[in-house]
Amino acid sequence: MQRLTKTTLSCAVSVATCLTAASAFAETQITVATVNNGHMIEMQKLTPEFEKANPGIKVKWVTLEEGVLRQNVTQDIANKSGLYDVMTIGMYEAPIWGERGWLREIDTSGDYDANDILPSIRGGLSYDNTMYAAPFYGESSMVMYRKDLVKAAGMEINDRDSWTHIRDVAAAVHDPDNGVYGICLRGKAGWGDNMALMTTIANSFGARWFDENWKPQLESAEWKNAVSFYVDTLSKYGPPGSSSNSFNENLALFNEGKCGMWIDATIAASFVTDPKQSKVHDKVGFAQSPYAVTEKGANWLWAWALGIPAATKNAEAAQTFVRWATSKQYIDLVGQTNGWAAVPTGTRASTYANPKFQQAAVFADAELKAINSANPNDSTMKPSPYVGVQFAAIPEFQAIGTTAGQMVSGALSGTMSVEKALESANRSADRQMRQAGYY
Amino acid sequence: MKLTQQRKLRTVLTGLFAWTIALALFFPIFWMFITSFKTELQAISVPPSLFFEPTLENFEIVQERSNYLHHAMNSVITSFGSTLIALAIAIPAAYSMAFFPTKKTKDILLWMLSTKMLPAVGVLVPIYILSRDYGLLDSRTGLIIIFTLMNLPIVVWMLFSYFKDLPKEILEAARMDGATPWDEMVKVVMPLSIGAISSTGLLSIVLCWNEAFWSLNLTASEAAPLTAMIASYSSPEGLFWAKLSAASTLACAPIVIFGWFCQKQLVQGLTFGAVK
């Protein structure tokens, strides 16, 4: 009996020792869902540096196409599945999910220096003054143009030109016989595709998505003027098939030297000036987005950010990772490893103050100016009840924006008139807002 | 024109027509293959270039960024695993429906097929929630179950079509020799139908290998097959066609080679019952 007790005891001690040893070496594994773009891929490559500095944390990456990412992370967070510990979300999702309690507050204590984050970007990722996602890179929109073609046409492009001047320049450089189109703009249907640009144009024409009582305003004279101008300009001076072009298609056209100018995300500046990607890398100029009757909301504001779902079981490790990936130290690390032209931009004031970055990125000033001039809390000439420049941060907007995008794309391809397109879009928006109980 | 000349002309025209269709079907695969050897700039150039200096850069990037073997192993395990389970269920089911039909057999067959008419997205939420509750999200087991259920109607239908054409006399003879229904299925029907079973299995493997909807929605990192790996190369901001083509070529290669070796069985499987 005594022998049996001894054996049992020694077994128990051995098991306990093994368990203690195992827990001493236990690793927390976090899964990060992200979108496939250059900056995110670089972060993936630099993850071993994070793991070296935090030996108890292992990072697993899931890279997804933007649409699939949105669907997967929404499913995950709404069902509290806990598949992901960190997820890449945009400025549209952060305040909505933060309000619903789906995201954890970002820990900005200690040496994180949250005050260094550009105010507009920080505001766009917050709800009720609490930051629910940490910005990894931010962007606005601006004009990228071919200096050589514009000069040869005897024209000029400056910051905040009027839309009519931009159309005149497009007409002057338009030379389809030689494969050059005056202007390239997004035409592909989608709330984040054509409607991102269309909303900035509409804002500058004095339009707004909703009035103070959340009634859709798509049939207003301002929207009609804006969409008519867009359709007319792009049909006359744009490349054929514009209604199926979005960022990547226009990037390809611009890099091939086929666009006189292109108004799109500031992130494009790093691609069109890259000799490895662009045939016209040394001929590109930048200017602030044009306007019609107001400068308010004339350029968009967007950020890809890292959020931590409330259902994660590894919140502490996730916070550590998010703080590292969005820190000043991380930007320094990228600068030292891959060069200063490759650092994620649009998030921190210290990046733009860095002389090495200023020297490496010819577009730095234009980008910072564009981001600082965008204000998601005051983006329309007439008062509006929503937050967001190129979107309204309400859950219903994705569906409303996508339907409107299809209608505007239809007007651009000539399958319906501008009036008919806006009437259908407004009717659909009205139905959805009514169903959602706004009025 | 003589009759023999007319026949020759008809043969040539039929051949030309068949080649045109075959080339049209093969063209996207060919284009994907050559794009994978281009630079991103060459991949988007207009007009597209057929002659260029090939580069292996995209394959290097795919190898560096993705754990190809991990994804390929997931594809192999889920495709073969679900096919084996589907066959294990479908063979007895098809056998029973072919040789011991009841009044409701036709209705059951039609009901099984009708499940394929429902768009997958229609049942996404319930299946996602069930997977979450049973701990099957991002697991190979979860994917095998879904793939099995997804292909079961097709597998049952294909085997049923073949079994019902087998001469009943053979089974009667076996029964006279004292064979039980189980013996009839295992020792008579299955050996006689080995071609049909293998071709049905091959088709099921191909369908599972190419499945993307459930793979993308129910997996993250651990169980993600090759289709999920391909999807990760599409980018909202930046050029990606050459890298995406390289990832697709690597993902397609195993199943194309497998299909090439088994094409005889595949064609036999797809055409049995077509000519009587």
Image (cartoon, coloured by chain):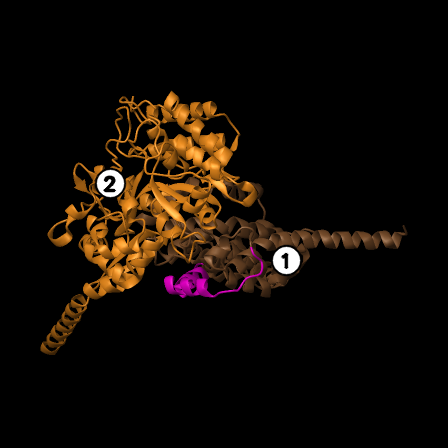
Q: Please give the residue where the numbered disc 1 appears in the rendered image.
A: B267
SS class, disc 1:
helix
Left or right: where A277 falls relative to A92: right
Q: Residue A247's image quarter?
A: top left
Label 2 marks a residue whose chain is: A
SS class, disc 2:
helix
Q: Please give the residue where the numbered disc 2 appears in the rendered image.
A: A372
Residue A130 position within the rendered picture, expressed as x and y whole percent measured from the top left: 17, 41
Q: Quadrant of the N terminus of chain A?
A: bottom left
Up-down relation of residue A232 to residue A332 (above or below): above
Chain in orange, by letter, is A
Q: A228 or A97, which lies in front? A: A228
User: As shown in the figure, which amino acid type bears the numbered disc 2?
Assistant: Asn
Of the chain colours in the picture, the one used for chain B is: brown
User: As shown in the figure, which amino acid type bears the numbered disc 1?
Assistant: Val
Q: Residues within 10 Å of mark 2 (few under 14, many from 20)?
A: some
- Give the magenta-colored segment's residue range: B49-78
Q: Residue A92's image quarter?
A: top left
